[in-house]
Image (cartoon, rainbow, N blue to C red):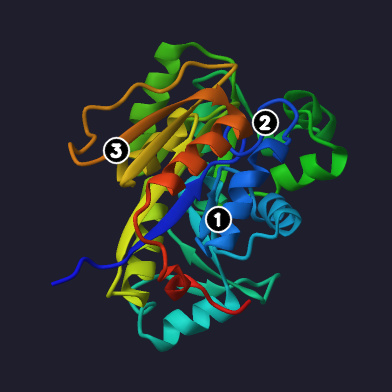
């Protein structure tokens, strides 16, 4: 029996990975993005950013694929692709709904809402030293992130996660993590903030989308690639067939967890941000044997 055609799915973090940590520039990644588009390989944003932030960047980059927001808490699917998967019977077991504000999108909700997390958050405020990003003035968010006023407002527009500006020590963070777990919540450290969210994470969201794409094209072999630079990226790196650690100018590269499967391929880019992203993606593309059937994963946007 001949080998099945191999299809790639790319999952990428944004800040510090596809985007420069300081300037948010992505210019150095454009050659690899052009290759992905030419070969019709879906590249899926998997970020702690909000819908409002990602949708703007997605339009700028010409990305027409689903995306994952707020650290894996929610997957947004373009309506046309959603209808395709729905007609194939792929959406029945998932918690989905049309977006109330943006009807061109359907969403798969994997995490908890901010309202559901609010009681725990209020309790934690009495024990630990931190500030909620969503409660800060826009001017403070701009100082912390170097975002514009409009971008700062979009960063605060959250439905499923709460970034925390952490002022306490590591022992306190460990205690908060333990308490969150007991409350069926999760705490993860990102590139800039500590994130409080439900039990979903970037890895759960990656696995969910991989399953949908595989069911759409069962005759193909899917190879998932994940690129990230922070601790909150580790869950998706663990789930991917190829894990790419992008080195950071501001924090150590996360260590390889012992949970990595022996069959997984692991790479560490010697360059930061979009330069490292570009070189890693181009290297992976050069090693692929057969991408001729990649169009099976496309749809007409």
Residue at screen point 59% across, 46% down: 32
Instruction: Determine the secondary structure under disc 3.
Output: strand
The picture places residue 18, in percent across and down from the top left corner, at 60, 39
The picture places residue 80, in percent across and down from the top left corner, at 57, 80
Disc 2 designates what residue?
20
Residue at screen point 62% across, 65% down: 64
Q: Mark 1 and mark 3: span between their CA atoms?
A: 20 Å
Q: In this view of the protein, can residue 187 be seen by the observer?
A: no
User: Nearest the camera: 50 or 121?
Assistant: 50
User: Nearest the camera: 86 or 300?
Assistant: 300
Instruction: Determine the secondary structure under disc 2.
Output: loop
Instruction: Determine the secondary structure under disc 1.
Output: helix
The picture places residue 56, in percent across and down from the top left corner, at 74, 55
Q: Is residue 163 above or below residue 205?
A: above
Task: From the viewer's perspective, tell me whether residue 89 is left or right of residue 113.
Answer: left
Residue 265, labelled with which disc?
3
Disc 1 designates what residue?
36
Residue at screen point 28% across, 74% down: 218
First reached walking from the N terminus: tag 3 or tag 2: 2
């Amino acid at each position: 029996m001949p080998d099945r055609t191999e299809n790639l799915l790319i999952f990428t973090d944004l800040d510090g990975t596809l985007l420069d940590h300081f300037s948010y520039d992505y210019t150095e990644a454009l050659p690899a993005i052009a290759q992905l588009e030419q070969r019709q390989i879906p590249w899926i944003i998997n970020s702690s950013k909000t819908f409002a932030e990602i949708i703007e960047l997605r339009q700028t980059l010409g990305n027409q694929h689903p995306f994952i927001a707020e650290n894996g808490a929610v997957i947004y699917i373009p309506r046309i692709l959603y209808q395709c998967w729905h007609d194939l019977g792929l959406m029945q077991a998932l918690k989905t709904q049309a977006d109330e504000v943006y009807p061109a999108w359907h969403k798969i909700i994997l995490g908890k809402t901010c309202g559901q997390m609010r009681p725990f958050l209020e309790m934690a405020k009495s024990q630990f030293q931190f500030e909620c990003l969503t409660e800060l003035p826009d001017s403070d968010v701009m100082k912390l992130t170097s975002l514009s006023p409009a971008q700062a407002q979009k960063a605060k527009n959250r439905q499923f996660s709460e970034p925390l500006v952490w002022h306490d020590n590591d022992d306190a963070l460990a205690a908060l993590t333990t308490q969150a777990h007991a409350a069926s919540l999760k705490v993860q450290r990102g590139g800039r903030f500590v994130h409080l969210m439900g039990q979903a994470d970037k890895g759960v969201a990656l696995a969910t989308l991989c399953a949908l794409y595989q069911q759409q094209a069962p005759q193909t072999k899917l190879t998932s690639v994940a690129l990230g630079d922070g601790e909150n990226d580790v869950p998706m790196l663990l789930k991917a067939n190829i894990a790419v650690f992008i080195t950071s100018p501001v924090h150590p590269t996360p260590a390889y967890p012992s949970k990595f499967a022996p069959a997984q391929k692991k790479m560490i880019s010697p360059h930061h941000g979009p330069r490292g992203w570009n070189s890693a993606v181009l290297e992976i593309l050069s090693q692929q044997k057969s991408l001729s059937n990649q169009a099976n994963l496309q749809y007409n946007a």
